[in-house]
Amino acid sequence: MAKMVDIAAKEDVPRRAMAVGDLVLRRETVRAIRAGEVPKGDPVHTAEVAALQAVKRTSEALPHCHPVPITGASAVLALGADRVTATCEVAATYKTGVEMEALYGCAVALLTVWDMVKSLEKDDEGQYPTARIENLRVAAKEKGHA
């Protein structure tokens, strides 16, 4: 039996969560992102917008996740030498937390970058020997602090 947890008796409380994760790429791919040479366009800004879209639609993708009235969200991507790091923060005043929204936003941001740079990451056999998502996690969460 599948069911959503009944949260009706819980009080609305200010909540905040931050998720982070990395997409490991070839150094040449990161250089192409920096130089604006990705054929599909700018993966950083596209992924930041995709993360915000994902945050708002988390309950559509995760069947046990309640729709949460988001009061604020941000997504920031940073380029390292061999990776893109995504950070997604989500806030709401509600009966349940926003960790899944932050994680989902972060994951979608990283997947968006991967989709946009996949032509640069493929080897001669069409495989992705370097590209991988790592360290996707909830880095911080708060409950009850305005």
Image (cartoon, grey):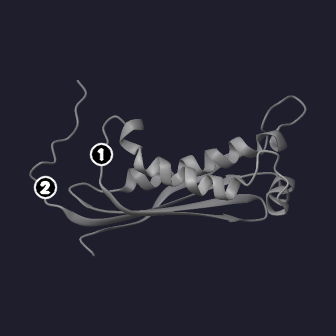
Image position, residue 3 (x, y; %): 22, 32
Residue depicted at 38% across the width and 37% down the height: 60
Q: Are marks 2 and 1 in contact (CB under 8 Å)?
A: no
Q: Nearer the viewer, mark 2 or mark 1?
A: 1
Tell me how many marks there are: 2
Does residue 7 appear to the left or right of 137 in the view shown?
Answer: left
Image position, residue 109 (x, y; %): 59, 51
Q: Earlier in the sequence, mark 2 or mark 1?
A: 2
Q: Residues within 10 Å of mark 1 (few under 14, many from 20)?
A: some
Label 1's element? Answer: loop
Residue depicted at 77% across the width and 59% down the height: 82
Q: Quadrant of the N terminus?
A: top left
Residue sitting nearer the eye, 132 or 45: 45
Residue depicted at 64% across the width and 61% down the height: 85
Q: Which residue is mark 1?
A: 67
Residue sitting nearer the eye, 137 or 52: 52
Q: Farthest residue to the left: give it.
A: 9
Image position, residue 57 (x, y; %): 41, 44
Q: Given the image, on which type of amino acid does mark 2 rest?
A: Lys
Residue depicted at 85% across the width and 62% down the height: 35
Does residue 79 appear to the left or right of 93 in the view shown?
Answer: right
Mark drawn on residue 124: none
Q: Given the image, on which type of amino acid does mark 1 rest?
A: Pro
Q: Farthest residue to the bottom: give it.
A: 146
Does residue 105 appear to the left or right of 91 in the view shown?
Answer: right
Image position, residue 98 (x, y; %): 35, 56
Residue sitting nearer the eye, 82 or 65: 65
Label 2's element? Answer: loop
Quadrant of residue 40 within the rendered picture = top right
Q: Which residue is mark 2?
A: 10
User: In the rendered view, would you say 116 is above or below 73?
Assistant: above
